[in-house]
């Protein structure tokens, strides 16, 4: 959504500008306006913001995609559920937008980091709740429990008894070293034959 501040074009337009802003402010209303931009008629929402008028661009109906492909199937709701939602909304309602906490904490933190770097100091840690420390895991206890569970599943006794040692089968010796030696000898014989010829 495109947003633009509107300004009065000279002293003659200042009076109607201020009059419109004050009228919208006093009635706590907004205006829907048609305006031209880039050679095309557009739709916008006009509202007072501080001492100025703000125009927020809107879309025409044919510019909005259908929501059929993203709308979930209709769900059955009881009257109690709807009443509960309305009660929750009522508890969260404020009299004015000024009563809401609409602070951009990310931008504030970013400005703090930039100022700290410019002043060659460490930025202040963010205020708020400290994250709870992660629980310490005893790896040996977890391993022993895992082994005991595996033995129990196999039907072995909990004590487990002594472990048995088995001989590892001997690996067959590789013949590659002998083959390399043979290849080197035949290559050496060929080069000596060429030299003598």
Image (cartoon, rainbow, N blue to C red):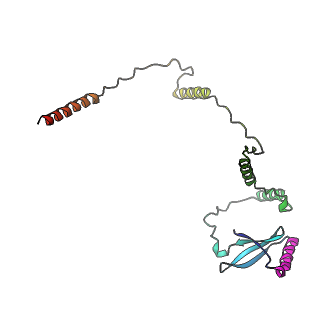
- Residue drawn at x 85%, y 75% is 18
Q: Is residue 195 left or right of residue 43?
A: left
- Residue drawn at x 75%, y 45% is 126
| The C terminus: image quadrant | top left
> What residue occupies the far top of the structure in this picture?
162
Quick one: 74 or 40, which is closer to the camera?
40
Q: Quadrant of residue 74?
A: bottom right
Quick one: 144 or 22, which is closer to the camera?
22
Q: Is residue 165 left or right of residue 190?
A: right
Up-down relation of residue 43 to residue 143 (above or below): below
Quick one: 57 or 85, which is closer to the camera?
57
Range of residues picked out in magenta: 10-27
- Residue 20 among magenta residues: yes
Q: Quadrant of residue 96?
A: bottom right
The secondary structure that most of the magenta stretch takes on is helix
Up-down relation of residue 45 to residue 90 (above or below): below
- Residue 52 among magenta residues: no
Residue 65 placement (x, y as % from top left):
62, 70
Residue 41 placement (x, y as % from top left):
68, 80
- Residue drawn at x 20%, y 34% is 187
| The N terminus: image quadrant | bottom right
Residue 137 placement (x, y as % from top left):
64, 31
Q: Is residue 59 left or right of residue 197?
A: right
């Amino acid at each position: 959504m495109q947003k633009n501040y509107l300004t009065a074009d000279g002293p003659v337009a200042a009076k109607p500008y201020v009059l419109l802003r004050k009228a919208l402010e006093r009635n706590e209303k907004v205006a829907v306006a048609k305006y031209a931009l880039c050679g095309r008629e557009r739709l916008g929402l006009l509202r007072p913001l501080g001492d100025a008028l703000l125009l927020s661009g809107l879309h025409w109906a044919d510019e909005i995609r259908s929501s059929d492909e993203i709308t979930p199937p209709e769900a059955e709701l009881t009257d109690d559920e709807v009443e509960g939602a309305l009660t929750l909304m009522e508890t969260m309602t404020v009299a004015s937008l000024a009563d809401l906490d609409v602070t951009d904490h990310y931008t504030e933190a970013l400005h703090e980091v930039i100022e700290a770097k410019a002043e060659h100091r460490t930025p202040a840690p963010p205020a708020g709740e400290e994250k709870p420390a992660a629980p310490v895991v005893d790896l040996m206890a977890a391993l022993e429990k895992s082994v005991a569970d595996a033995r129990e599943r196999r039907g072995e006794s909990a004590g487990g008894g002594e472990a048995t040692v088995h001989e590892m089968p001997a690996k067959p010796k590789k013949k590659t070293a002998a083959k390399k030696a043979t290849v080197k000898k035949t290559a050496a014989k060929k080069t000596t034959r060429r030299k003598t010829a």
